[in-house]
Structures are given as C-alpha cells and as structure tokens.
Amino acid sequence: MPRYSARMGLFAEFRCIAGCIGTYPLDAVLYRCPNCGDLLEVEHHLPALREKSADQWKRLFGERWRSVEEPYGSGVWGKHEWVAPHLKVDNIVSMGEGGTHLTRVPKYANEIGLGDVRVKQCGTSHSGSFKDLGMTVLVSMVNQMIKDGKPIRAIACASTGDTSAALAAYAAAAGIRSVVILPRGKISTAQLVQPLAMGSLVLAVDTDFDGCMRIVQELASREGVYLANSMNSLRIEGQKTVAIEIAQQLGWDVPDWVIIPGGNLGNVSALGAGFEMLLALGLIHRRPRICVAQAEHASPLVTAYQRGWAELEPVKAKTTLASAIQIGNPVSFKKAVRALRAFEGVAISVSEAELANASARADRNGLFTCPHTGVALGALEKLAAQKLVTRDQRVVVISTASGLKFADFKVGYHEGKLAEVTSPKYRNVPVELPENYEDVRAALLRGLDTSVM
Amino acid sequence: MPRYSARMGLFAEFRCIAGCIGTYPLDAVLYRCPNCGDLLEVEHHLPALREKSADQWKRLFGERWRSVEEPYGSGVWGKHEWVAPHLKVDNIVSMGEGGTHLTRVPKYANEIGLGDVRVKQCGTSHSGSFKDLGMTVLVSMVNQMIKDGKPIRAIACASTGDTSAALAAYAAAAGIRSVVILPRGKISTAQLVQPLAMGSLVLAVDTDFDGCMRIVQELASREGVYLANSMNSLRIEGQKTVAIEIAQQLGWDVPDWVIIPGGNLGNVSALGAGFEMLLALGLIHRRPRICVAQAEHASPLVTAYQRGWAELEPVKAKTTLASAIQIGNPVSFKKAVRALRAFEGVAISVSEAELANASARADRNGLFTCPHTGVALGALEKLAAQKLVTRDQRVVVISTASGLKFADFKVGYHEGKLAEVTSPKYRNVPVELPENYEDVRAALLRGLDTSVM
C-alpha cells in the first residue's frame, strides 16, 4: 500500500529493479525483492510531484538551500518531497548534512590542461564522508517506524568504515542503538574509533566478513535488528541529493562531466537517480557524462565497460590505498550500469601511484583529499590526457570523504614510505636548518624560487 | 588614510587597543601599534554601516546565508561589509568557510541537567577548524596587497597546528607561498601533514619556539614575508562571524550563554567583537554571558578571573590533551578581558580527566568532539552543577575543530591508555565472540539491555 503524505498526495515506494510486479511501502522491513531477490529501488510518484512546476521547485529549493530553518537547511531535507515524502518532519534526524561547497580549483585545472574543474566537498560533513547523506534518511525512517510501533531494537551494519561512522552518529543522535559486527582481530581500534566513541555496540566475531554478513542477516530476520547495509535503497535517496545540489550550485545547469570514485557503486547509482529526477521534473534539460573511477586493484566495473558493459565478473579485490572502494563484487552493479548507459558513461582505473600522486597534486592546490578522491582525480587526468575531457568543458569531481580520515596515507606519501608509490612526484619534506638567520634566509629564498605552485 | 570602498563609503582601519592616537589602513604591513607596541584592532566606521537599518542588514544576511552565489555563500563573506569592506570581491580567497551547523543535543543537555544546548560546529570546515574563518580574511587581504603591488613574497607562521593547516590551504588556493617555521626535531610529520601536503615551505630550525619567533619576525621585517601570527587582527574579523551566525541561526536572538575554549584568547575576543557589532547596529538587543573554558594545565585567564580580572600572570603551561590551548602567556589577554567584563563573563578550568570524559559523553550523543570542545563541555557541566546555568536557559557551545584531527586521543581513551584518565567513564570496547549465532545473539541482547544511551 503506498503511503500518502498529508500534503500534495506525494508518495514513494520500493520496487524491484528487475521489473517484478508489486510495490512495497518504505517502512516495510525489506532489503531485496521478495520475489526474485534482486535489488529494490525507491520509485517516486512523479505526477504528484509535477503539480509544482520546475520553476516552483527551483524557487522552493532556493529558499531552503542551507537556510537556518530546521531541518530544511540540510541539503537532504531541503529536498524532502523528492527524498522521502512520507517522513514526518518531527521524525527527521539531521546533523546539517549536505549543502557542501563546490570548490573551484583553477590552478589545478590549468596544470592538467583543463579550464573549469570544481570539487564537490562531500567529506566536509558531520561524520566526515558522503555517507551522512544516506544515513540521515535511513535513521529517520527507522525512527519513524519505531514511533509507529514497529519492533525495531537496533540498526546494524557490517562495515568498518565510513558507513559505521555515519550510522553511529545518526543513531546516537536519535537515541537508537547501533550495532557494528565485524571479523575479530582484523580491525584496529583506530579503524573503529568513530563508532566506538559514538556508542555503537561493537561485536567482534571469530569469522570472516561473509560470516559476519550471515550472522547480521539472521539477527535482522529474527531479533528486530534493522540492516543499514549497502543493499538498503533508502540511503540512495539521500545520496542522490548530491546531483541535485550540483545542478543548483551551477544555477540549475549541469556540468559536462561528473567524475566519481566507485566501489560498491551505490553512489554512482544515486548520482544517476538524482539527475534522472531533475530531468523528469524539468529542472534540467541535458545530461552530464559520468565517469566512474576505480582503483586498478578493484576494478570489475572497468572490465565490464571495456567489454561493452558486459555482465559483472566478480574479482577478488587486491589491497588498495583507496580502502573504501576495495570491492570485487559490487552490490549495485546493475543499477550503476543502467545509469552509466543513460549518461554516456565511462569507467577508468588508476594505479596506486597514480591515485596517490593525483591526490597530492590536488593538495598542493589547497585541497586535502582522501585517496578515493585521488582515484577520481587520477581518472580525470587520464580523460584530459586522452582529450576526452577538454579545456572548454566544465567538470565536477565528487570528493567522498575528509582527508583527515587518511592522515597516515598522507604521512606515508610525504615520508616516502608508501610501498605502492616508489617515487612520489609531489613529496614535500621539512628543510632542516641550524639556528642562524642567514642560513634560514637563504633556505627561504631558495624555497621561494623553486616554486611548487 | 582610511580606504573608502566604492559603495556606501564603508571603511575599516587598524587602531591601537591601548588608545594611542592614530589609525592605519588594513593593508599596512603592521602587527602591533607602532607607538606603544600593544595590540591593534580593526575599527569599523559605524555611521556608514548605519545607513542600512538593522532590518535591512538582517534581510541582506538572510539572502546571502550559504547561498550558491560566490563568495557570499561563505559565512564570512556573506558579512563582507562588516568584515573587510575595502576588500574587492575579485581578491577574495574562499573555500566555503562558515555557515556551520548549530546542532541541537537534547539528550546530552538532559544528561547534564540542562534544557537547550546547541553546538556550533566550527570544525566542519575546509581545513577542519575555526581557523579557516580568520585565514580567509588574512589571505584575501594579502592577495589584494600583492595585486596592488606590495612586495610580499610569502605568508609565514610559527604554528604547528590548525593555524598552519588553514594558512597552507588558503595560500595554496591563492597561489601565494606559505612558510611554516618551527623547532627542529620536536614536531612529527603527522603533526605537520596538512601544511606539508598543501605545499608549505617548512623550515625546521635548530632552536626553540621563541627562537623561531625571532627569526620569523626578522624575515617579516626584511624579506617581504607577511606574518599570519596570533597578533594579526585581520583574523579576528573573520572569526567574529561566529557570533553573527549564532544570532542569525537563532532568528536574530542570542543564547543566554556561550561557552568557548580559550588559549591565546583571540577567539573569545572575536566572539565579543561580533556581539558588540550586532548590538551597535541594532540586530540584537541583549548580551549573552560568555564562559571561557581552559585546561587546568594552562589556565592563566582563570587565575586572573578568580582575582577579579587581575593583571595577567604568565605561567608555564603544562602538557594537556587540549594541545591547541596549551598556552601560558596568551597574546590576546587584554582584548579577552575587555570582552569578558562586558559580557558578564566567567572563566572555568577543567582537569584532563574532566575534559576527556566530557568529550566522550558528548560523542555518545552523536558528536565526535575534539579535546578543546571537551574543555568547553567540561566547563558547561560545572556551570550546570553549580546552577549558574539552568534548565530554562539556552546555551551554545563553540566546537573549535574536527574530532578527526584527534583520532589518537579517542583511541587512547577507549583503549584505556591515556595516562591522564585513569578511569575513563564512557569507555567503549568491542565484545569478542566465537562464531556461533547463539553467542552473538546473547551478546547483542545483553548489549541492548545495558543501554549506554
């Protein structure tokens, strides 16, 4: 049964991406199609949304853009009707996510032969990554389900990274318990410091990652534990606001290219969903091209692309500095390929040295990029070298997390100690000097002459 | 000579805080009063600002609040006329600083016996701290000075912390060289990773911190190096926008209390300056009370307060987890006391264990606080216990930096390895379990029952 919101008759519901008959309410505890087991997606009732014109939506979104009015100042909840219209405002759990800066990097653009490159700073966010955008939707939905009397006791995930950090933050703010289940002995306190600090119940089980997944799914089916895993389509609804924000920040236009790093591929699916909705409701009139950037060590999408968007062949991902996208069997592969076909997409992989050098080059221009953003920038450099992206085009690069989460990566690079990067191109080290004004002065003048800028 | 801006005859200039006769243009290379050596402050020409009514300013600031129009979407540059009216928009170097979330923490407030506590998240910013707010002004000003032909070759500081990170970011974005001068052998790559990555020329000199300061001042006077030190009053102009934003986010009202951590005391001076300007121009009609929170190990302001705002007695600061405020001889003492007298201020110190526990308690409610924010929260807990702050009052706590900069502090706390905190009250550790569904289930149910929330 579709749930109608009080105003405007807006609603959205789950539907199977393989086309199975049937829709399901968003507050059903459901992660896959009960018929075929494929992924679900959230389908919005577009005719109701069309009761407002494109200009009316633009005006409404403009008024709300990072306004001081809660929760509409949030980049996600400013788009409430497009994200989760059935969610009551009182149930929304927001930490001011979204509305991140679209930073121009003219010097970097020029260095790589391009004209207009901007970086969407999704990592400048409450828990330090774009995962906040999806988690505010998921936790708000669960908050509403609990208030409606559903027997949900906790929200769980099997992630050790940004997902668990975002889950811990939003669940703690809502007063809902979060549970992180992971393989014992393989994860350090440092990797878990955000969920531990934010009060997650962390269960370290003597098994591998697949064993954790089996247990967490059993807990979900029997113990009233809701899953915040990467199959959960509610998160996509929050993440798609990145596309809407980019268009809004460009005066309701789109860039020629969007470059996004990809692992499980939920994020590119979300990007595609956002642009599709903008097109369907008339707020934009053309499509950007999309490039998914992968680390060579975990690039099944690139393989599929090179074979003409062939079927997925799962691989065993090798260790990569871009740890959050070290995934050989991406959950959202089908959704991603559908989006990439529609957006004239490409998929490009970069080596460990390429991603580290691209990240360091961007840093020298005033960013402080995570390695995944380095993957996207490395791919952009290749597109520029191949003249697939040209100086007259506008490019937006999605930066997915705060560089502060990856201080060890930066230290290793500048100390020259990353095994993956034998000759770091943009290494910067302190100049050691005696206490003598003339020596310091000489070093200063030398340093200013050998400009890195 | 005051510089008049093209529109409205707005201007601002440096003036000595001790009352010496004379004013100086903001693009003079000047850090202290040339007459008496005391601090300078920026004085704005209020009659010209009064040509707009309070309501007109509110409307203008409302329209600009985090708008997509550059650079006015910046929290600092949305207040351009109040910050640095003589700066041409083309010379502004902005990374979308300010406009940070004012996060409600109702569960935390209730735990400590209060009703309405909000946290101003200044650390959710480009370089991860409130220093971005001042640095965008300083670097923009230097950018304009260089374009006007002043012989400035670089901007230097002697900081190893947030100041050098912010300087490196904004200077790199502007294409101006940044220089960090510091004692050799005392600073690790990790402490310097942001300025190194962002291309600062780092000079490690075989001397102590005072020796570095002497050298950097000599370079400034002889080699065209501009100082980004804590005496530089331009930074205060950016930082004061925190006060303006708080009022704006509260619908042009003020909280009853603002709690701010203090070391060099520039930040509380800035907060006072912001509220004074709001009062002078009629946008607010009352003053909040201000509490400066210090670590016991570095609390000369608290000593002065306890003696009825006596003269500063510099101390040798002891090591504290709140490393950025480990300062025994605060540069901005006089400005701070002036503000605290005007705002019925108090100064409170907290022990290492108190700051760590307060930080951890806030984290359990969905924040991820830096130790300096822990100092402010620890002070708030004391004010609440003393009934100086009561449940019917509204409190804003200034969070100064991202917790992600202090992951080691968090790890140490939850591993129980901080020497300063013998029994961490809110310690959270993983539960280790065999691969057995029933064991995991039992641990889950136990964990959910012993609620931390």
Image (cartoon, coloured by chain):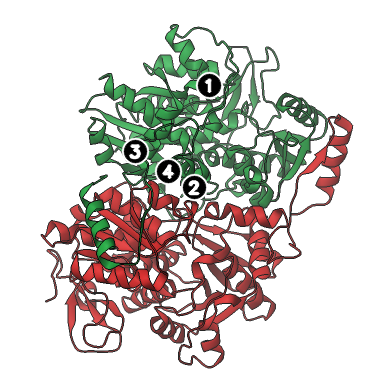
Chain colours: A green, B red
C-alpha gap between disc 2 and disc 3: 17 Å
Which callout, 2 or 3, points at the residue further toward the start of the chain? 3
Q: Residues within 10 Å of mark 2 (few under 14, many from 20)?
A: many
Taking B361 as reference, is A387 left or right?
left
Name the secondary structure under disc 1.
Answer: helix
Does residue B256 appear left or right of residue B447 in this picture?
A: left
Residue beneath label 3, please?
A361
The residue carrying mark 4 is: A414
Q: Residues within 10 Å of mark 4 (few under 14, many from 20)?
A: many
From what the image shows, is residue B129 above or below residue A396? Answer: below
Q: Amino acid at mark 4?
A: His
Chain letter of the residue carrying label 3: A
The picture places residue B67, in percent across and down from the top left corner, at: 34, 50
Q: Earlier in the sequence, mark 1 or mark 4?
A: 1
Callout 2: chain: A
Q: Marks 3 and 4: which is nearer the front?
A: 4
| Cα distance in 3D space between marks 4 and 2 | 15 Å
